[in-house]
Amino acid sequence: EIFSSALGLVYILNGSNVVDFVDRYKMKVILVDSHSFERNIFVGANNIHSKRRIKLLKKVLIVYLDYTCYT
């Protein structure tokens, strides 16, 4: 709530599905509906076995800590 209040709802896009991203000077994400956004920072929420997480972190060991955070 603190984060979303500080940003404002205009910058929050719930229910979107990122199918790919490109990390260059700015991060560019491509959504399932073909829309794309280019920004300095993206915050995403997905599961521990996400395809985007694997692409971003490559071979970093992912450890589940037995808890979940919901907002």
Image (cartoon, rainbow, N blue to C red):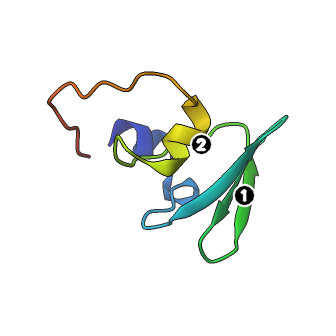
Left or right of 44: which side holds 39? Answer: right
Amino acid type, callout 2:
Phe
Coordinates of residue 64 in the picture (x, y in percent): 25, 29
Query: According to the image, label 2 marks what residue?
Result: 42
Q: Residue at x 43, y 48 (%)?
A: 50
Asked if residue 46 is positioned above or below residue 23 in the image, the reply reads below
Left or right of 63: which side holds 42? Answer: right
Residue situated furthest right in the rendering: 25
Q: Are marks 1 and 2 in contact (CB under 8 Å)?
A: yes
Please report whichever mark, 1 or 2, sits nearer to the chain's N-terminal start.
1
Kindly identify which numbered label has been placed on residue 21.
none
Q: Residue at x 42, y 44 (%)?
A: 5
Seen from the viewer's position, the closer of residues 46 and 12 is: 46
Seen from the viewer's position, the closer of residues 50 and 2 is: 50
Splitting the image into 4 quarters, where does residue 55 fall?
top right
Q: Residue at x 68, y 50 (%)?
A: 21
On the rendered image, what quadrant is the N terminus found in? top left
Coordinates of residue 58 in the picture (x, y in percent): 58, 30
Left or right of 57: which side holds 62? Answer: left
Amino acid type, callout 1:
Phe
Seen from the viewer's position, the closer of residues 49 and 41 is: 49
Coordinates of residue 53 in the picture (x, y in percent): 50, 40
Query: According to the image, label 1 marks what residue?
Result: 37
Asked if residue 50 is positioned above or below residue 36 in the image, the reply reads above
Q: Quick check: can you spot residue 43?
A: no
Left or right of 13: which side holds 36? Answer: right
Coordinates of residue 39 in the picture (x, y in percent): 73, 45
